[in-house]
Amino acid sequence: MCVSCKGGLVKKRRKSGKTGSVGQTAEQYPMEDRVLKAAARFMGEELLPLLGVEGVVKRVAPTEAVFLEVKDFLADFNYEMADGTWKRLEFESDSISTEDLRRFRAWEAVVSYQYKIEVSTCVLCSSEAKVLRDSLTEGMNTYRVQIVRMKDRNADRMIEELEEKQRKEALDREELLNVLLTLLMGGEMSRKERVERSFGILGREEERVGREEMARMQSVLYALAMKFLAVEEVKEIKEMMAMTLMGQMLMEDGIAKGIEQGIEQGIAKGIEQGLERGEFKTLLSLIEDGFLTKKEAATRKGMTVEQFQGKLMELKLI
């Protein structure tokens, strides 16, 4: 359930239609969100131990308990642990600011109150993040988060060594899991190149690993790419992503309409149109539920209100 901390009140989102695992309609959120959630349990069970996060995951917990920012809740993962507590993963490519810590604290407070549980936040930072504040003291209280980063590991060297090994033999499972974390590591290689070469490494192991697990691994890499890469960089590698198993999942999971509309221009264009339609449908839903004004939604897309209205009409959402 999505709620908004607004004016001291907790406002529930309206539900309608066929809902998913956390009560949201299947069409309310972009397709990326559903792919990320499909990969969430895999990430919790396989990658949290590599990141040094303690505890055993019992299940994936709802991420929509608190509505804070559209751009943030798409990439978050929340887990119910075996001991009954919750752990939340946040991704930060920039320095952790006071406002970030206040936002994390607000989310924890409302979720703890709503679900009557103990909750803590682990912040996964890229190696480029400079200022890593892990605590905030205001009044009598001090709030803390756990910082996780892997800047002491060299992504350049690891990628080159794994590519060299692949020319002779197959990679083992732990090596493939580490490929998923290259965006959190140090090194000189650009983040875009890390993603491209990491997808290549994974793709060459597809037949041995199996389709289902490979798709989950690619989904986790995609989740991190969406968080740490610039918008233009994501656009540049989108065609390559479309050729992966993860891309096939996107096509099969409710985005057929986008593919049909863009089939003359190729599958990649169809995927792009489907994702775009999902993004604007999400913003329209937030406007209808009172979380955003039309002007605020237009600003998020870098548009005027008139341009935003025209896009909604073009996508046949209104």
Image (cartoon, rainbow, N blue to C red):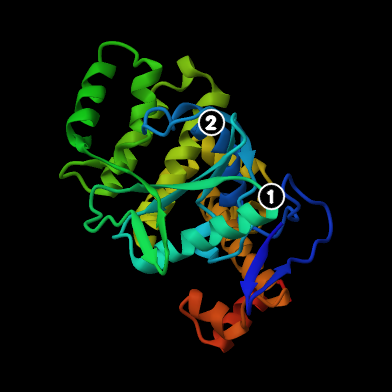
**Residue displayed at 58% across by 45% down:** 118
Residue under numbered circle 2: 42
Q: Quadrant of the N terminus?
A: bottom right
Residue 36, placed above or below residue 285: above
| Percent position of residue 10, x then y | 69, 69
Q: Earlier in the sequence, mark 1 or mark 2?
A: 2
Pointers 1 and 2 in contact (CB under 8 A)?
A: no
To which quarter of the image does residue 290 belong?
bottom right
Residue under numbered circle 1: 115
**Residue displayed at 25% across by 11% down:** 168
Residue 211, placed above or below residue 316: above
Q: Is residue 61 left or right of residue 234?
A: right
Residue 191 visible in the current orientation? yes
**Callout in the foreground (1, 2):** 1
Helix, strand, or loop for circle 2?
helix
Q: Is residue 19 left or right of residue 258?
A: right
Residue 257 visible in the current orientation? no
Looking at the picture, which amino acid does disc 2 mark?
A: Phe
Extreme residue in the right direction:
17
| Percent position of residue 273, x then y | 57, 60
| Percent position of residue 32, x then y | 56, 50
Helix, strand, or loop for circle 1?
helix
CA separation in Å, label 1 and label 2: 24 Å
Badge 1: residue crowd in 10 Å (few <14, some 14–19, many ≥20): few
**Residue displayed at 34% across by 16% down:** 171
To which quarter of the image does residue 284 belong?
bottom right
Q: Nearer the viewer, residue 52 or 171?
A: 52
Extreme residue in the top direction:
169
Looking at the picture, which amino acid does disc 1 mark?
A: Tyr
